[in-house]
Amino acid sequence: MTGIDNRPIGMFDSGFGGLTVARAVIDVLPAEDVVYIGDTGRYPYGPRPAHEVREFAREIAWSLVNDHNAKAIVVACNTASAAAFDELSRELPVPVVSVVEPGARALAVATRVRRVGVIGTVGTISSGAYQRALAAVDADLEFVATACPGFVEFVERGQTSGDEVMLLAERLLAPIVAANIDALLLGCTHYPYLSRVISEVMGTGVVLVSSADETAFALADMLRAQDLLAETDRVGTHSFLSSGDVEWFADFGRRLLGPELSSASRWERSANE
Ligand code: DGL
């Protein structure tokens, strides 16, 4: 084995949320090419039944492998990770990284009082994926999990502050505030964009944990262990595709991710799954 593989890393989310993970991947692995698909034409995933999200995730992941030659897949969406990670890991010919386990590990490290919270979409929280991942990391952790329907829609509209989102946050986070935790996992890749609001509601004693950095570190470890890292002296390229309005994806996405998102193109469905 040469230990060098310049094929791209494939990533996807229902929309813009996974850009928090893409940002971390670009920073941690600057030599790697990245292809990101945002399924904005079919977002949100959170309220959809698990079987439907699983089919979307399979379709996109296979497209990343077949049409974009991805060497690894990052499921940069908690809802899709919860619904499809096991299946994708079994059927894809390349390694798959989820955001759930890295997030659960980071949360267990962040708490001092051993009482933590997880927030996510209805699909993620009702799947029990975090409940299982946390129990596997530390069976003695006490935790409270709550779905936050509406948060993703605010982010996708670009409305990450103001009275409306603050009122919703106060209402949805009330059971988490009452649980006296000291670490809260943002178990949806859209939620880091609402960190200011969430942190104001939770108070300064609660650490907010985002799985983006942890997922990028887990990806780097996996690529190293499997001899899949790109040459170190190259500069990675970054491509962004969307199933929805590509102009909006490029304009709004650039504000969220940064200059690497210089343009976006249309994701065409793969015919050869
Ligand atoms: N960003 C996605 C997640 O991490 C889901 C958002 C949605 O489409 O509902 O769960």
Image (tube, helix red, strand yellow):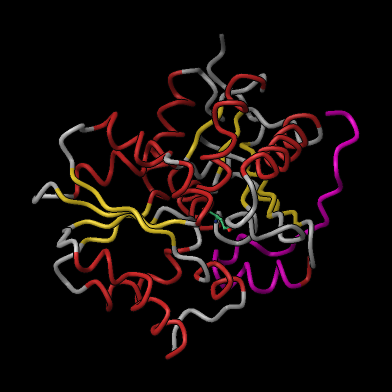
Name the foreground residue: 137 vs 145.
Answer: 145
The percent coordinates of residue 232 (x first, y second) are 50, 33
Residue at left 57%, top 22%? Answer: 4
- Can you say which quadrant of the picture contains the N terminus? top right
Q: Is residue 91 magenta?
A: no
Relative height, residue 36 to residue 173 (above, below): above
Residue at left 27%, top 78%? Answer: 200
The quadrant of the picture showing ligand 1 is bottom right
Relative height, residue 34 to residue 69 (above, below): below
Residue range in magenta is 248-273
The percent coordinates of residue 33 (x first, y second) are 63, 41
Residue 262's image quarter?
bottom right
Position of 83 with respect to 177 (left or right) is right
The percent coordinates of residue 100 (x first, y second) are 42, 40
Residue lying farthest left?
113
Question: How many numbered circles does the render carry?
Answer: 0
Name the foreground residue: 43 vs 146.
Answer: 146
Residue at left 40%, top 34%? Answer: 218
Position of 59 with respect to 168 (left or right) is right
Relative height, residue 93 to residue 270 (above, below): above
